[in-house]
Image: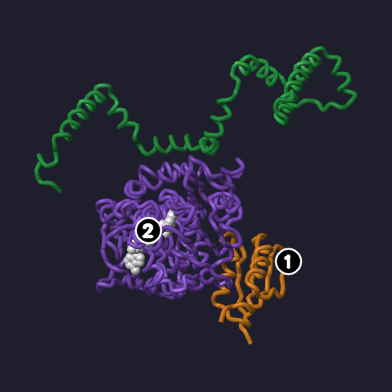
Amino acid sequence: MGEVIKVDAKGMACPGPISALTRAYRKAKNGDIIEIEATDPGFKPDVQAWVKRTGNELLELTEEGGVIRARIKVTAKRA
Amino acid sequence: MPEKLEEVLTGERLAALERTLDLLVKLDEMGVLETVGDVLEPDTLRYLFKYLMHPGLLKVADRLDVILDALGRVDYEAVNKNIDLVNKALKSVPEEAEPVGLGGLLGALRDPDVQRGLGFLVAFLKALGKSLAEEKEPGKA
Amino acid sequence: MAKEKVVILGGGGGGAILANLLPQDRFEVTVVDKSEYHVFLPGFLWVAFKGQPKEKFRRPIKSLLKPGVNFVHDEVVGVDLNERTVHLKGGGKLGYDYVVFATGAPLDFDAVPGHRELVERFGDFYSTLENAEKLHRTLASMREGRFVIAIADPIYKCPPGPHKGTFLSYELFKRLGVADKVKVVLAVPYPHVYSSKTIADVIEPELEARGIETHTFFTVDSIDLEKHKIYSLEGEELDFTVAAVVAPHTGPQYKVEPGNVKDDSGYIKIDKYTSQVVGFDDAYAIGDCTNAPTSKSGVTAHLQAEVVAKRLQGFDARYSGRTNCPLITDGKGLFVISDYDHPPIPVRLSGLKRFLEELFVATYWSAIKYPELWDPIFEAYFEASAPEVFLRYGGW
Ligand SMILES: Cc1cc2nc3c(=O)[nH]c(=O)nc-3n(C[C@H](O)[C@H](O)[C@H](O)COP(=O)(O)OP(=O)(O)OC[C@H]3O[C@@H](n4cnc5c(N)ncnc54)[C@H](O)[C@@H]3O)c2cc1C
């Protein structure tokens, strides 16, 4: 079973939540789940693009009260 | 550090130093040195730069190339001829102009002042339209 | 009244200015630095891409400090905030009334496999003047192939630095007459060519016009010097003939007691407005060594130094998070202007900004030595160009 890595990127603008995601991803292993919360409105399209480019799995992407929340399953890390 | 004065004061430096000293004497006689000394106070500088660093000035300075380009092409004779007219008209516009509907417009058209203004605007619009056409299709008009 | 003892750790961009700002009738100021020289880091670009002599960008720290400021040439190996003691490598100890961390963000060349070998072979433009000199020699001898600039961690000093390197290397290859044979490549960890989309939109056409190849979502994971390949965390790879990779940055490597004043990445935790170290009213941190959520830049270090100087004298002063990072192309420049409350505002590339950047570089030493002359000028500039002011003018 993988670990759940929580990242709070609320209130972060540039270089922003994607940087926080990248840093969490560096530490993650396949099977882990990254849960990230952000308030930067640019995060939604950015995280979608990121998932597409890296080939990881987007489990959930929601927006509630200005908080964008993404749950990503790490599947594409090089062994 | 060099020990002796002769090592520091080479021939060309001595010549430059003599000229500098003459200049300093001149500046001193004219009171420039004393004045510069008096003006060079942190507070004077602070206010000078506070005044100079206006965001508008920064923006204008940044676009000096664009602005000079535009200003260089202005027909100043034409501007000069009409500037008083425009100034006067701008000044006499009431603070809050009344809204005018279609009916009011027809009434206003009977006013000879409005007629003269319209004449000017129509002539201007005609010229503007002509240059627009030329811009689109050079050589057509 | 006895003078209060202020010990400043690091005599770089932040530390040296702070030392010169503190009135000596009230404070006994000591600067500790492991290096005898203050290095002007942006100079790396001028050395690596313009071939300027490295001596221009390095001065003895002692020569920059006002007479009366003590300089201790030693390495800090530990700070005990509870005991108010700074431990030095030479075995000495310094007590203080106030301590200010200003030791910058050292680079970690062991985090990315293959990085050390890469720098040893080619040099780089982020670590030392010697490596910048080496990179210049490497680039000047390139006749063809691909020069790749890439980034190993999204948080690094001067966010437009790699972009400056990109434009300046293109200019160098043009001067050498090989711009059509050497491809310049820029790879960034962000979704766009710059972390802020507003700025990315301005420079993207400029990169394109010069035929510079760009890659987004590319965070360097490992480097294979033999195969001439860089691999990204995101799962892609890039071929290079020569490459310069910005290394991951770190917080202070020395021990600080209590340990919880460092964050997960090792940076000193501060109040982002006052620069006060969390939990201590006699400790501050400025510049690259803090966790302040703003760009690591010389401007930040300078403005935080001013805030700390004022606070130590009993005035209320706050740092707004203001950045002013320059991004230059071969002919024009812009500044990335933002603060805690405003993401980068729209700016255009212009000749004036290129000139201003050259002026900042030319007057750097003077600005450190004579803050009384420069601060009124900087103050006026930062006030007039504050994000909320310029936004009313539609940007700069
Ligand atoms: C290529 C490049 C371009 C840049 N361009 C710009 C720019 O255009 N504009 C801008 O604003 N910023 C720019 N920066 C960033 C800027 O240079 C830094 O943000 C700035 O120098 C930070 O100042 P500092 O005082 O925090 O750290 P530094 O200037 O790095 O100083 C830290 C000092 O602490 C000393 N030190 C470290 N550890 C110890 C120890 N254990 N004991 C004793 N002494 C120690 C070091 O020797 C050094 O002298 C650039 C940086 C780079 C690399």
Q: Secondary structure at mark 2?
A: loop
Q: Residue at x 14, y 41 (%)?
A: B8
- Is the residue C291 above or below the residue B109 in the image? below
What amino acid type should be assigned to the residue bearing mark 1?
Glu
- Give the chain letter for green: B
Disc ID at residue C141: 2
- Give the chain letter for orange: A
Which image quarter is the C terminus of chain C in?
Answer: top right
Q: Secondary structure at mark 1?
A: strand
Count of numbered circles in the view: 2
- Of B123 and C347, nearer the camera is B123
Residue C193 in view (yes/no): yes
Q: Residue furthest right?
A: B103
Residue placed under numbered mark 1 in the picture: A64
- Is the residue C119 above or below the residue A33 in the image? above
- Of B48 and A70, nearer the camera is A70
